[in-house]
């Protein structure tokens, strides 16, 4: 049998930290963690079990840019909660609470620079927006239209929020870091929809208006209807960008997961725990599904098709 050196022309490299941009087929030994790693190819995306939330809940918000770096906040049902938890890829840690407890809330941004948008109570939803600096929440400028079950995308200083309830709403607002401005409405007003993308290049999908599969793309000035989800649903979550997104979960309670390639949706591997009113964050390659109904604390980590860093063991 050929050795690694005979195949690749070099021995396995010993390094004190993982390479920043390893290539397919590269193998190295991390002398700090005493772990052998390499880059393989994941032919199909898959969900893996992550660490459970400390507080099981639904209608929570989430922020983060990968499946090992995230923040969740708000939710219900053990009384509406302000609880905030931070995820490191294996476990959740309780950190400082929101200023206002609420559920059916939305999040944007990263683990250390996030926004919490809308939610309930009051019965008609709130416009309250809170900003997270990595340590604590600060109340900032309110949405112009108070609502719950919105979709939100973007960063702490450049975000977009669209849809919502009560009554299916088409209202879209843009955030400049200090205030919200109304921009072009969705073509189909709806709530409990999924979102992905940025302030000027967004995707909205699903929601509570039949056939619950509508997908719209935003170019910074207007929304355009594009190809529908394969499975219509409401109360779903999403992650990614306008041209590479993933949608998962929803009602009727399902684990269905679909990937968007910029023009159409393809069904891929289901969540292990079917649920709706869950939170989602991350990218098409590295997403997180958290909480939901039936009431659960379950966290699942999505790894999309493509190169993947693997840890080698003797098992």
Image (cartoon, rainbow, N blue to C red):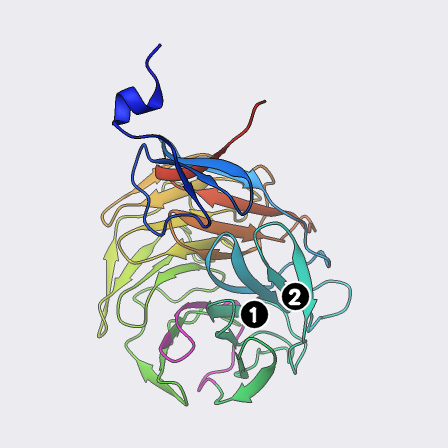
The residue nearer to you, when weighing 130 against 32, is 32
User: Residue at horizontal 34%, vertical 23%?
Assistant: 4
Residue 89 placement (x, y as % from top left): 57, 51
Residue identifier under label 2: 75
Residue located farthest toward the right when viewing the structure as drawn: 78
Which image quadrant: the C terminus?
Answer: top right
Task: Using a 10 Å C-alpha cutoff, classify the residue at mark 1 as few (fewer than 14 neighbours), some (14 to 19) or many (20 or more).
Answer: many
Q: Quadrant of the N terminus?
A: top left
> Tag 2, which secondary structure?
loop
Q: Is residue 5 above or below residue 284?
A: above
Residue placed furthest toward the top: 1
In the structure shown, which secondary structural element does the residue marked by tag 1 occupy? loop
Relative to the observer, which residue lies in front, 258 or 126? Answer: 258
Which quadrant of the structure image shows residue 124? bottom right
Span shown in magenta: 143-159
Q: Quick check: 39 left or right of 96?
A: left
Q: How many marks?
A: 2
Q: Which of marks 2 and 1 is nearer the N terminus?
A: 2
Query: Where is mark 1, residue-wise?
Result: 105
By secondary structure, the bulk of the magenta-drawn segment is best described as loop
Between 176 and 190, the residue placed more toward the observer is 176
Q: Quadrant of residue 9?
A: top left
Q: Where is residue 191 in the image (x, y as percent from the top left)?
A: 47, 64
Taking the image as drawn, is residue 225 in sight? yes
Query: Disc 2 vs disc 1: Cβ atoms closer than 8 Å?
Result: yes
Find out whether residue 158 is within the magenta segment.
yes
């Amino acid at each position: 049998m050929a050795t690694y050196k005979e195949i690749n022309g070099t021995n396995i490299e010993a390094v004190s930290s993982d390479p920043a941009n390893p290539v397919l087929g590269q193998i190295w030994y991390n002398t700090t963690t005493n772990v052998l790693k390499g880059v393989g190819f994941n032919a199909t995306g898959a969900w893996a079990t992550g660490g459970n939330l400390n507080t099981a809940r639904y209608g929570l918000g989430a922020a983060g840019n990968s499946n090992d770096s995230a923040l969740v906040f708000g939710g219900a049902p053990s009384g509406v909660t302000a609880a905030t938890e931070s995820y490191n890829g294996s476990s959740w840690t309780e950190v400082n609470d929101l200023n206002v407890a609420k559920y059916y809330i939305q999040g944007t941004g990263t683990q250390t620079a996030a926004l919490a948008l809308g939610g309930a109570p009051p019965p008609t939803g709130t416009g309250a927006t809170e900003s997270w600096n990595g340590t604590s929440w600060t109340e900032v400028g309110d949405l112009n239209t108070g609502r719950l079950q919105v979709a939100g995308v973007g960063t702490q200083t450049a975000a977009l929020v669209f849809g919502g309830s009560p009554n299916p709403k088409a209202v879209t607002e843009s955030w400049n870091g200090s205030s919200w401005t109304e921009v072009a409405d969705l073509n189909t007003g709806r709530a409990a929809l999924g979102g992905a993308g940025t302030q000027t290049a967004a995707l909205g999908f699903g929601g509570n208006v039949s056939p619950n599969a509508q997908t719209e793309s935003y170019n910074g000035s207007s929304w355009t209807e594009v190809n529908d989800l394969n499975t219509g649903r409401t109360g779903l979550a999403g992650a990614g960008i306008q041209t590479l997104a993933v949608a998962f979960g929803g009602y009727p309670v399902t684990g269905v997961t679909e990937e968007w390639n910029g023009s159409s949706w393809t069904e891929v591997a289901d969540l292990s725990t079917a649920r709706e009113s869950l939170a989602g964050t991350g990218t098409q390659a590295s997403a997180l599904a958290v909480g939901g109904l039936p009431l659960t604390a379950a966290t699942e980590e999505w790894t999309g098709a493509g190169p993947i860093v693997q840890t080698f063991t003797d098992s």
